[in-house]
Image (cartoon, rainbow, N blue to C red):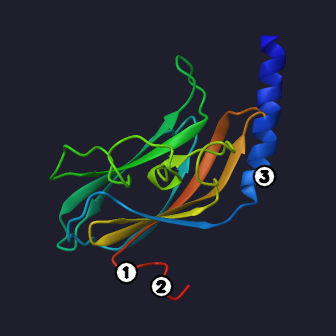
Amino acid sequence: MKRAMGIALAAILVVSGSRAQSTASTVYAESFHKYATHVTEERFEVKLSPDNPTYRERIKDSAGNDRYELTIVPQGPEGDNKITSWRVALRDLQHSLYTNLLLTEQQPSSDLKNNLWWLNPNWFGGAPIRARRIMKVDGFYVMFQVENFHFTPLDSPYLDSMSVKFAFTNSDPRVGK
């Protein structure tokens, strides 16, 4: 019975994953963190895999000082080294009380806009996996979008790669689009 349920769940994940792949939308939210800080604008791409599952980048303020830390960490079944999704966090290095500024409110919720940080290709994972995610934090915007991802084997819920593009900008990326 457990095996049949596992196979059914895997089939649902594959079908929903391919369905989520075709959805390209923009989801916008504003962080609970409301300071006037601007950042040094930059764009970069992060390639994640089981061999390279985590990422860490310092983000500089407009004066060129390290002000924020962007981290990406894998998530999977407890006690297993398989990856089912990645979690993105942005931390203010001057206010360490807040562990993730990519939240609309500090309380956990199922609200889509409060879960943009969760890169989950599962249909039930919140934002569509290919959605362009824009979060206003302080006086700047963080934009990120999953470009590619791959399961191994193809019919499993386990990711073997994900590529995510990031942009940090001080002007609203939705303007003029």
- On-image quarter of the C terminus: bottom right
Q: Position of residue 109 (x, y in %)?
A: 45, 43
At horizontal 34% and vertical 74% (from top left) the residue drawn is 41
Relative side of 146 to 66, left or right: right
Amino acid type of the residue that numbered disc 3 sits on in the rendered structure? Arg
Check disc 2: other Cα within 10 Å, few if <14, some if 14-19, many if 20+.
Answer: few
Distance between the Cα atoms at labels 2 and 3? 29 Å
Do labels 1 and 2 touch, CB within 8 Å? yes
**Secondary structure under badge 1?**
loop
The residue that disc 1 covers is 171
Relative side of 12 to 55, left or right: right
Question: Which of the two residues, 104 or 13, is positioned nearer the viewer here?
Answer: 104
Q: Is residue 27 above or below residue 7?
A: below
At horizontal 74% and vertical 35% (from top left) the residue drawn is 152
Q: Position of residue 135 (x, y in %)?
A: 42, 64
Q: Position of residue 112 (x, y in %)?
A: 53, 52
Q: Position of residue 106 (x, y in %)?
A: 32, 46
Question: Which of the two residues, 161 or 91, is positioned nearer the viewer here?
Answer: 91
Distance between the Cα atoms at labels 1 and 2? 8 Å
**Secondary structure under badge 2?**
loop
The residue that disc 2 covers is 175
Do labels 2 and 3 touch, CB within 8 Å? no
The residue that disc 3 covers is 19
Q: Earlier in the sequence, mark 2 or mark 3?
A: 3
For residue 85, which quarter of the picture? top right
